[in-house]
Amino acid sequence: MSVITHPTHTYTATGVYTVSLTATGPGGSDTLTRTNYITVTSGGGYTTTTRVISYTYDPLNRLTDAAYSTGEQFEYQYDAVGNRTAMTDTTCVHTYEYDAANRLTSVDGVAYTWDARGNLLNDGTFTYTYNAAGRMVRAESVTVTLVYTYNSSGLRVAQSVDGDECF
């Protein structure tokens, strides 16, 4: 049995109208998003331009191509166990490398490091710190420090950005 939530409608910028619909079932969830570009005409009416995205999948149901009606195209390649090894867009190729545990170790040559529990420690931009329960308590880059606070049930209750607390 699957569950489909009501679609969400947003206007992200003048003339940009986006609708998203999410279906959830035993195997996970899938969201479909469509964006229309609305142009007001001088006669008081309007026209819309729909951006169409065509997806292609391999026999293992992995995304191999996303072609946009705007001309953008993204191609994806995978290794034998299903890890994405490359993503090619209209301007460049991004490469991904993994260790024997299938953890991401490098994106475009930038190293990722993990601890023995499988927590990401560094992604080339942020350094991450975890508490004894394995919850991230700190993420720090050269420009920002994020600190997370948890309650006794393990739920995150606050985030501090450079010392300013957000709830």
Image (tube, rainbow, N blue to C red):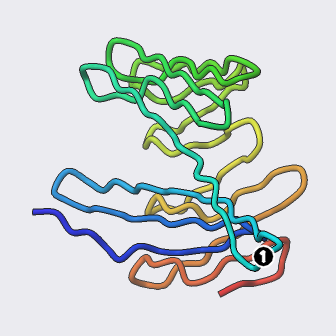
Residue at 55% x, 36% y: name it: 114
- Disc count in the image? 1
Asked if residue 25 lies left or right of residue 164, the reply is left
What residue lies at 68% left-to-right and 26% top-to-bottom?
A: 111
Determine which quarter of the picture holds residue 61. top left
Q: Relative to the observer, which residue lies in front, 88 or 56? A: 56
- For badge 1, the amino acid type reads Gly
Q: Where's residue 2, x and y in %?
A: 16, 63
Residue beneath the point at 69% across and 70% down: 46
Is 7 displayed left or right of 111 in the figure?
left
Q: Residues within 10 Å of mark 1 (few under 14, many from 20)?
A: few
Quarter of the image where one finds residue 48: bottom right
Q: Residue furthest front?
A: 43
Secondary structure at badge 1 equals: loop
Q: Residue furthest left?
A: 1
Q: Is residue 129 above or below residue 89?
A: below
**Residue at the top extreme?**
80
Q: Is residue 151 above or below residue 124?
A: below
Q: Residue furthest right?
A: 143
Foreground pick, 85 / 129: 85
- Across and down, in percent, residue 62 comes to 35, 28
For residue 120, which quarter of the picture?
top right
Up the image or down, 162 lies above or below 29; here it is below
Q: Residue at x 79, y 72 (%)?
A: 161
Quadrant housing the N terminus: bottom left
Q: At which x and y percent is residue 167? A: 65, 87
- Residue 59 on image: x %, y %: 24, 20
- Left or right relative to 4: residue 66: right
What residue is disc 1 on?
43
Residue 67 lies left or right of residue 145; in this view the side is left
